[in-house]
Image: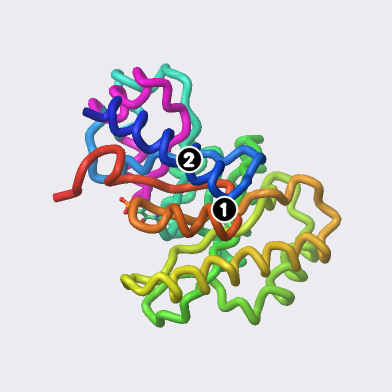
Amino acid sequence: MIKDNLLYVNEAIQNIKIKNHIEYPISLLAVSKTYPATSVSEAMDAGQVLFGENRVLEAYSKFNDGLIKDRKFDLHIIGHLQRNKVKEAIAIANMIQSIDKIETLIEVEKYCQKINKHIDFLIEVNTSGESQKAGINPESINSFLETIQNQSFTFCKLKGLMTVGPLTDNKNEIRKSFRSLKELFDYCKTQLDNPDFDIVSMGMSNDFELAIAEGSNLLRIGSAIFGRRE
Ligand SMILES: *Cc1c(COP(=O)(O)O)cnc(C)c1O
């Protein structure tokens, strides 16, 4: 049951926070990719408001389903955003977590301006060095921030950083990856004059305990809530 899973995950988060003496809030994003609107509706019944989806068109049709479209939710796009899907993404989401190209951001800004809608975004960072992974190289953070500042976006608001941990059972490697995102976040904070830069998005079903211990304040959890994906 989704309701029980949510209860279980929220309890686990509380316990990990206590164990690590963490007092700041940690948000739970329920990743509903591949699951139907009925599952999202069930999670909403259990009080879940924040959702994440990978694929824009899937998200667009799911969250326009009559079962959920008029209910209260926040939706984050967490997968690669293609430039030709910007319109649908902006229509349905209030945050894009997966920005790793300025060109995409420029498209988003243009469209947001056109429809007069503000959107939050995170910079996705490849902290594991895995070559097939999305995200900017940590070394290019300075030039990325500089370009963002030079563009003086008014509709797109930078809120923090996001990473996907390495695909491995090696806890040290996962920890190292999360730690480097938090260090990069702290560095960015010193470089930016932006009080709203406060999100560290990391941690999924299999590694959220490590992510919390390393400073995550936004967990993206799918299978532990909705069950294993086909
Ligand atoms: C699928 C996905 C998640 C959730 O993964 P689970 O292992 O199901 O918790 C989190 N973040 C991103 C970017 C994803 O694609």
* Residue at the spot 63% in from the left edge and 50% down from the top edge: 199
Colour convention of the picture: rainbow
**131 left or right of 91 in image:** left
Distance from disc 2 to disc 1, alpha carbons, whole Å, reads: 15 Å
**134 left or right of 139 in image:** left
First of labels 2, 1 by sequence position: 2
Check disc 1 and report the residue beneath it: 216
Q: Let me know if residue 44 is in the magenta part.
A: yes
* Residue 135 percent across, percent down from the top left: 51, 70
Front-most of 175 and 27? Answer: 175
Structural crowding at the residue carrying mark 1, measured as other residues with C-alpha within 10 Å and reported as few (<14), some (14–19) or many (≥20): many
Front-most of 197 and 77? Answer: 197
* Residue at the spot 13% in from the left edge and 50% down from the top edge: 230
* Residue at the spot 59% in from the left edge and 61% down from the top edge: 123
**Residue at the limit of the structure toward the right, as seen here:** 193
> Which quadrant would the N terminus be assigned to in this image?
top left
Front-most of 130 and 102? Answer: 130
Check disc 2 and report the residue beneath it: 15
* Residue 69 percent across, percent down from the top left: 38, 22
**Element at label 1:** loop
* Residue 37 percent across, percent down from the top left: 26, 29
* Residue 67 percent across, percent down from the top left: 29, 19
* Residue at the spot 36% in from the left edge and 74% down from the top edge: 170
The image quadrant that residue 172 belongs to is bottom left
Q: Amino acid at mark 2?
A: Asn
The magenta stretch is 38-61
Q: Let me know if residue 198 is in the magenta part.
A: no
Q: Amino acid at mark 1?
A: Ser
**Element at label 2:** helix
